[in-house]
Image (spheres, rainbow, N blue to C red):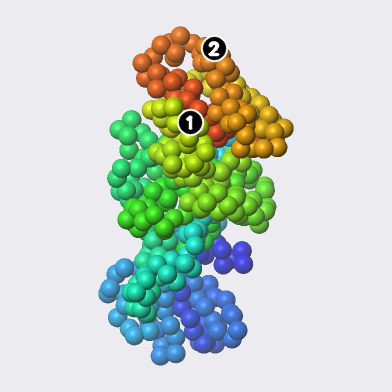
């Protein structure tokens, strides 16, 4: 398995054959890596040049779009979501320790699990009267193209493959998205994916995938994604990281789907990205907040982006501590109230933060407070609409600015 894993990064094709290279008396220097399953031999080929295929053999070309390579009738395409980087320390894919070293802020590996919500219903009822075999096949093929083809391009060439407009944190001075080289696809295909990498790049990739998928489906209201992200150190077992990310994903599914679980919080994607609509709230909460005007900044990402740019490291840490303390008091007081829908609970959830936020802002240097660009941040932080997002905002900022922290 280790030897096979080391070969997969540069694999160009896979030959399925009934005879081993040893039986064919092929010289050692010409042999490909070979393994056997149920009496059938598979050769992992790293050379892009065409090879001769015998009548009983089958050649699968991996993500190969050169029509000239498909001259024989026993040659077929094999589409794979297989993006990854070469390790600089050992043979094969980059290691978890290399990912942590490449991460911004806290040294952690991020693990993302994500899939399409209610895919069975989409196939079962989505086509309505046009529910024919050709249309079902076409729908399946389109899902395959997104997860096995497009995601490779999105990871490799981020700038040219993102939909326009899009929201992102990793932007340069020209407001163009930074590349994300430190990702590894563990699997991607069908309707789901499992990706690892430097934690900040995994988070960005999750948002890129969601926005791209929404554009790909024409923003269809019933075709959505839910996902979960876990952050772990380099020595954390992969199987356990997969289970942690899966638990976050399950919590996202329970949130009415179209959601992401991260940093111990679960919100709809639109809330994370910052174009949340007030109709995400239930009817009672909407009526309760009706006199309040929605702020200029709404959600999680807009605050992380602004505060990461405008606050220095020491200021950010102090700000984060106060924001986390506010969120902790809110959570503790809400736990003490059995009826979470009571008026008292709404007062705590949406307005308890005001004195602490006012104090936190007052502690910032005057050059920050008096900056006109900080006005939307100040007024939006005081808005009750943003009160549920404080813990996520603070944890994200702390991960970006600290080299040692255990994410919550």
SS type, badge 1:
helix
Q: Could you tell me which secondary element the residue under label 2 belongs to?
A: loop
Tell me, yes or no, if residue 362 can be seen here.
yes
Q: Quadrant of residue 142?
A: bottom left
**Residue 289 tag number:** 1
Position above or below: 199 against 354: below
Depth check: 338 or 367 in front? 338
Please name whichever residue, 366 or 287, is drawn nearer the observer in this view of the structure. 287
Q: Where residue 146 sits in the image (x, y, percent)? A: 39, 61
Q: Left or right? Give the position of 178 relative to 404.
A: left
**Above or below for 347 versus 360:** below
Is 129 rendered above or below residue 105? below
Q: Position of residue 362 (x, y in %)?
A: 52, 11
Q: Which residue is mark 2?
A: 363
Q: Position of residue 272 (x, y in %)?
A: 47, 40
At label 2, counting other C-alpha atoms closer than 10 Å, the crowd grade (few under 14, some 14-19, many 20 or more) is few
Q: Is residue 140 left or right of residue 360?
A: left
Which comes before the other along the chain, label 2 or label 1? Answer: 1
Direction left: furthest residue: 68
The picture places residue 325, in percent across and down from the top left corner, at: 64, 24
Q: Is residue 197 visible?
A: no
Relative to residue 19, is residue 170 drawn left or right?
Answer: left
Quarter of the figure with residue 318: top right
Assess disc 1: are there few (<14), some (14-19) or many (≥20) residues with their C-alpha within 10 Å of its C-alpha. some
Q: CA distance from mark 2 to mark 1?
A: 28 Å
The quarter of the rendered structure image containing the C terminus is top right
User: At 60% from the left edge and 31% from the top edge, which residue is drawn?
Assistant: 343
Residue drawn at the location 36% of the way across and 16% of the way down: 372
């Amino acid at each position: 398995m280790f030897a096979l894993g080391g070969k997969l990064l540069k694999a160009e094709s896979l030959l399925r054959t009934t005879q081993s290279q040893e039986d064919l008396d092929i010289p050692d220097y010409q042999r490909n890596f070979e393994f056997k399953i149920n009496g059938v031999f598979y050769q992992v080929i790293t050379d892009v040049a065409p090879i001769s295929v015998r009548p009983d053999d089958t050649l699968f070309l991996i993500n190969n779009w050169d029509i000239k390579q498909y001259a024989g009738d026993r040659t077929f395409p094999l589409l794979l979501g297989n993006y990854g980087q070469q390790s600089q320390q050992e043979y094969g894919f980059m290691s978890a320790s290399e990912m942590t070293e490449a991460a911004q802020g806290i040294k952690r590996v991020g693990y993302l699990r994500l899939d399409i919500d209610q895919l069975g219903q989409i196939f079962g009822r989505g086509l309505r009267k046009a529910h024919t075999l050709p249309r079902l096949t076409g729908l399946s093929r389109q899902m395959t193209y997104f997860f096995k083809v497009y995601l490779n391009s999105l990871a490799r060439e981020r700038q040219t493959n993102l939909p326009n407009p899009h929201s992102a944190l990793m932007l340069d001075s020209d407001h163009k998205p930074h590349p994300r080289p430190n990702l590894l696809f563990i699997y991607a295909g069908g309707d789901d994916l499992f990706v690892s990498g430097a934690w900040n790049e995994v988070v960005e990739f999750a948002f890129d995938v969601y926005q791209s998928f929404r554009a790909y489906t024409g923003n269809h209201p019933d075709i959505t994604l839910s996902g979960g992200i876990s952050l772990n150190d380099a020595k954390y077992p992969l199987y356990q990281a997969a289970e942690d990310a899966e638990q976050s994903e399950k919590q996202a599914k329970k949130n009415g789907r179209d959601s992401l679980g991260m940093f111990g919080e679960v919100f709809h994607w639109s809330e994370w990205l910052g174009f949340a609509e007030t109709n995400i709230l239930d009817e009672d909460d909407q009526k309760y907040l009706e006199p309040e005007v929605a702020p200029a900044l709404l959600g999680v990402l807009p605050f992380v982006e602004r505060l990461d740019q405008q606050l220095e490291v020491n200021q950010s840490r102090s700000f984060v501590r106060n924001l986390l303390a506010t969120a902790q008091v809110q959570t503790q007081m809400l736990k003490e109230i059995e009826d979470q829908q009571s008026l008292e609970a709404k007062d705590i959830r949406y307005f308890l933060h005001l004195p602490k936020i006012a104090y936190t802002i007052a502690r910032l240097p005057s050059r920050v407070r008096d900056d006109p660009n900080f006005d939307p941040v100040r007024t939006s932080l005081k808005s009750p609409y943003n009160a549920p997002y404080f813990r996520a905002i603070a944890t994200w900022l702390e991960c970006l600015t600290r080299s040692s922290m255990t994410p919550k």
